[in-house]
Image (cartoon, grey):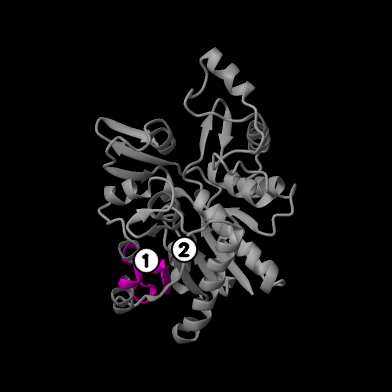
């Protein structure tokens, strides 16, 4: 079996850890590929930062800081302190010393002309992740947020301002010229199941499928597409996805996010959708919209609960797959 996951952020990282755990326990010969959001990426102090790729890599490697939710465990921040003393970079965007080592390595290879997808392969080869990570694109297509008076890089809006500035729109600068990274379209076309992680629907999953060619590839993919809701009982599981959803006119609910993605049979993204037990009342409306739906526990409290969500998603895929082919 081949499983492809669209993923970004901490929620995506924890979901992928659960997918890997389930596969290792029950599907030892299955292959997992993650297509990862790169819209958060940026140049800072001469270094190329790739927050989602790194968060997922560190999580799968067991090197992430579970308390903060980002960065390496056991980090020191002496270099960031020195940068602040020199007045360089963003003082509100702290990079740990070990993390800076990753960014230096990535930037070194990029400046040698190595594409991001190959850089990612080299970086991840350090650990036995059990998942192949592919950036959604090798091209720079960064997410900016339009606010009153101008626009900000997504990281400035998200990290410095904590999404407090009213977002008027999200713009993926340069996305019209971006192309899927090598391996992305193949991972979609060859997948038995495509899982949409409970990542931010707007600036993680939305950014991935806005890259020309990716949405189109999913539309004709033979595999079943199953998503897991990042919203439980009207509340975001993590982060500020509610603010992003409000900015694009989508309600903060499991049902609304699924309808925003849309049924693949009607030109959307999904064949099936998992909601939490607390949102079981949404099932009839989703079924009526052409999205097979199931209510299961969706809180990712640990690896075991995340693995069970993955198992549930694959079970739903197996149940609806025959009917959509």
Question: Percent from the top left, x then y, of residue 216?
Answer: 43, 66
Q: Which quadrant of the structure image shows residue 234?
A: bottom left
Q: Give percent across and percent down for residue 172.
A: 40, 45
Q: Name the residue that disc number 2 marks.
A: 298
Q: Residues within 10 Å of mark 1 (few under 14, many from 20)?
A: some
* Location of residue 251 by image quarter: bottom left
Circle 1 sits in a helix, a strand or a loop, which is it?
Answer: helix
Q: Nearer the viewer, residue 138 or 198?
A: 198
Marked residue nearer the N-terminal end (1 or 2): 1
Q: Is residue 257 above or below residue 178?
A: below
Q: Residue at the far top: name it.
A: 86
Q: Is 259 on the left or on the right of 102, as rendered?
A: left
Task: Quickly name the residue at label 1.
Answer: 278
Rendered residue at 58%/23% (across/down)? 80
Determine if the magenta segment contains residue 267.
Answer: yes
Asked whether, in this view, residue 161 is left or right of residue 39, the answer is left
Residue 103's place in the image compared with 266, above or below, is above
* Tag 2 secondary structure: loop
Range shown magenta: 259-281
Q: Which residue sits at x=52%, y=58%?
A: 300
The image quadrant of residue 114 is: top right
Q: Residues within 10 Å of mark 2 (few under 14, many from 20)?
A: many
Image position of 29 with respect to 114: above or below: below
What residue is rendered at 35% in x and 54% in y? 235
Screen quadrant of the N terminus:
bottom right
| Magenta segment includes 240 | no
């Amino acid at each position: 079996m081949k499983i492809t996951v669209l993923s970004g952020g901490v929620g995506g990282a924890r979901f992928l850890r659960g997918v890997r755990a389930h596969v290792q326990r029950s599907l030892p010969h299955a292959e997992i590929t993650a297509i990862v959001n790169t819209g958060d990426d940026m140049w800072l102090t001469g270094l190329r930062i790739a927050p989602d790729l790194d968060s997922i890599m560190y999580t799968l490697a067991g090197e992430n800081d579970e308390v903060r939710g980002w960065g390496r465990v056991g980090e020191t921040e002496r270099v960031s302190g020195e940068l602040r003393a020199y007045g360089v970079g963003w003082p509100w965007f702290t990079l740990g010393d070990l993390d800076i080592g990753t960014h230096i390595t990535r930037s070194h290879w990029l400046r040698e002309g190595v594409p991001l997808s190959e850089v990612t392969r080299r970086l991840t080869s350090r650990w036995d992740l059990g998942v192949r990570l592919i950036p959604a694109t090798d091209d720079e297509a960064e997410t900016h947020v339009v606010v009153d008076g101008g626009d900000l890089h997504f990281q400035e809006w998200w990290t410095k301002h904590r999404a407090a500035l009213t977002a008027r729109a999200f713009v993926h600068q340069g996305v019209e010229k971006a192309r899927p990274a090598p391996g992305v379209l193949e991972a979609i076309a060859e997948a038995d199941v495509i899982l949409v992680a409970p990542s931010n629907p707007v600036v993680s999953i939305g950014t991935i499928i806005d890259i020309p060619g990716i949405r189109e590839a999913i539309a004709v993919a033979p595999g079943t597409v199953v998503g897991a809701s990042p919203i439980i009982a009207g509340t975001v599981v993590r982060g500020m996805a509610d603010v992003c959803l409000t900015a694009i006119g989508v309600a903060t609910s499991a049902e609304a996010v699924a309808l925003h993605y849309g049924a693949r049979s009607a030109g959307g993204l999904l064949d099936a959708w998992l909601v939490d037990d607390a949102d079981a009342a949404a099932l009839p409306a989703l079924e009526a919209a052409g999205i097979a739906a199931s209510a299961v526990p969706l809180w990712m409290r640990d690896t075991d609960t995340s693995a069970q969500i993955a198992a549930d998603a694959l079970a739903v895929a197996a149940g609806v797959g025959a009917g959509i082919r």
